[in-house]
Amino acid sequence: MVVPPKHFLVAQTIFLGDVVLTIPLLQHLKHAYPEAKIDVIVSKEMEKLLICHPCVSSVLTYDKNGEDKGWSGILKTARRLASNKYSLALVLPGSVRTALAVYLARIPRRIGTDQSNGLLLFADKLKFRRELRSSPHGRSVVFLDRTWKALGGRGSFISPLFTDVVRLVPNHHATLRHLQLLEPLGIPLREELLQPQVYPSKRDIDVIDQLLIEVETQKLIAVAPGSTWATKRWPARKYEASIKQFVQEGYVIVLIGGRSDSELCASIGRKLGPKSLVDSSGKLTPLQSAELLKRCRVLLTNDSAPMHLAASVGTPVVALFGPTVPEFGFSPVGGNHVIVERKSLWCRPCTPHGGERCPIGTHECMNEISEEEVSQAVSKLLGPARAK
C-alpha cells in the first residue's frame, strides 16, 4: 500500500501575482490530503499574504535579494528545508535557485516542470526574442538551456533536479499550469477550487475600517497605476483623464500599490484633490490591500499583481495589457472582467513579463489605449447603478 505524503512543501518564490495564482494548487492539495501539513516557501515580501490561509500550515521565506543572496543563501535555505523532513515538494516554475535549494534539501520526491525559467515558456510567441537576454539572469538561463540541449539533455537544464517532471501547456491559464504539478499525484481538478481565496485577518479588516472611516464606501473605485516593469504602465496623464469623470460623479478614487509606486500614485493624487482620494500606496500589506479592493466597485489596473488580488476577492477588473498578452495565461481569474489592449499591433507581445524600455521606442501598445475607451470599460463594470 502506498503511504500518502504527510508533509508537503510548495515552493513559489517570485512575484506577488504568481503567489496569488498558486493558491488554487494549495486548495486542491488540502482537499486531497486534509490531514497533511502544507508549508509554503515564498520570497520575503510575500510572507504575509498566506499567513492566515487555512490550507497553509507554515510560511517560510527565501530572501534571494537580501540575507539569502548567492550560493551561501541557497545552501542555507536547503539546510533549513532539510530540517523539516518534507516527504514531497512541488516546485513552481520561475526560480532556478529555489529549485536547486529544494534539490539540495534531499526531499525524497520533488515535482517540477520542464521549464527552467518563465522567460522561456513563451519564447515562440515573442516578436523580440532578444528581450529574453535583456538581463544577466536571462542570458544565463538561455545559455544554460542551450548548452543542456546541445549535450543531449531533455526538458530543461534543471529537469534532473526533480523526480517527476511535468510538461506545461503554454496556452493554459497560469492557474491551470500550476495545477499540472498535481498530475503525478492523480489529483483531479475541481471547479469550486479554481478561484484563489485570500484570508485577511481581523487586524487587516480593522486597518481598512480605519482607513475608510470618513469615506462613503459605496463610491470607491480602485486604481493601480504601477508595475514592476516600466513598459506595462499606462501613462499617468491617461489615468488622470480617464478617472476625472468619476470624481465629478462623486466617486472616491482609491490608489493601490507598493512602496515603489508611491511617487507615481502621489503625482496622480495631486490632480484629484484630497476629498476625492484615498492613497494607500506603500502603506498596506498584500492582505490589507486585498481587503481594501474587496470594498471597491471596480479596479482599473495594468497587468500587475493588484489585478490578481482584486479577482481573488471578487472585485471586477479593467485590465490594460500592453507588451504582454492575456494568452500568456495571466489574465484575471473568473468572469466579469474587461481586458483593454491593442490586438492589431505587429510588435505584441515583445517580452514575457514586460521590460524597462520599448524595443522599438514607441510604446504604442500602451500609448494607443485611449482614455475614453478605458472610462467606458469602467462604466460598463459599474453598471447602471452609478453614484448618485
Image: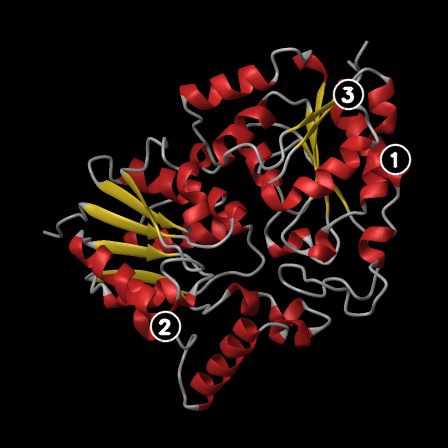
Q: Nearer the viewer, mark 2 or mark 1?
A: 1
- In the image, residue 103 sits, relative to residue 55, either above or below, namely below
Q: Along the line of sight, which residue is nearer the eye, 381 or 82? A: 82
Name the disc covering residue 159, or none: 2
Where residue 189 appears, as percent x and y from the top left, is 41, 43
- Relative to 184, 106 lies left or right: left
Q: Are marks 2 and 1 in contact (CB under 8 Å)?
A: no
Q: Is residue 297 left or right of residue 121?
A: right
User: Is 72 placed above or below 38 here?
Assistant: below
Any part of residue 319 in sight: no
Residue 344, percent from left and from top: 84, 58
In what quadrant of the picture does the C terminus appear? top right
Q: Earlier in the sequence, mark 3 or mark 1?
A: 1
Left or right of 310? Residue 75 is left
Question: Residue at the location (90% across, 36% down)?
Answer: 372
Helix, strand or loop under label 1:
helix
Judge left or right: residue 21 versus residue 360.
left
Kind of residue sitting beneath label 3: Ser
Instruction: Give x and y (percent) for residue 89.
Output: 28, 55
Residue type, mark 2 in image: Ser
Please tell me which residue is depicted at 65% across the width and 54% down the height of the picture: 327
Tags 3 and 2 touching, CB below 8 Å: no
Which residue corresponds to the image point at 64% horizontal and 73% vertical from the top-left? 134
Camera-side residue of 322 and 328 = 322
Residue 276 shows which numbered tag?
3
Q: Residue furthest left?
A: 1
Mark 2: secondary structure: helix
Q: Are marks 3 and 1 in contact (CB under 8 Å)?
A: no
Q: Secondary structure at mark 3?
A: helix
The residue beneath circle 1 is 241
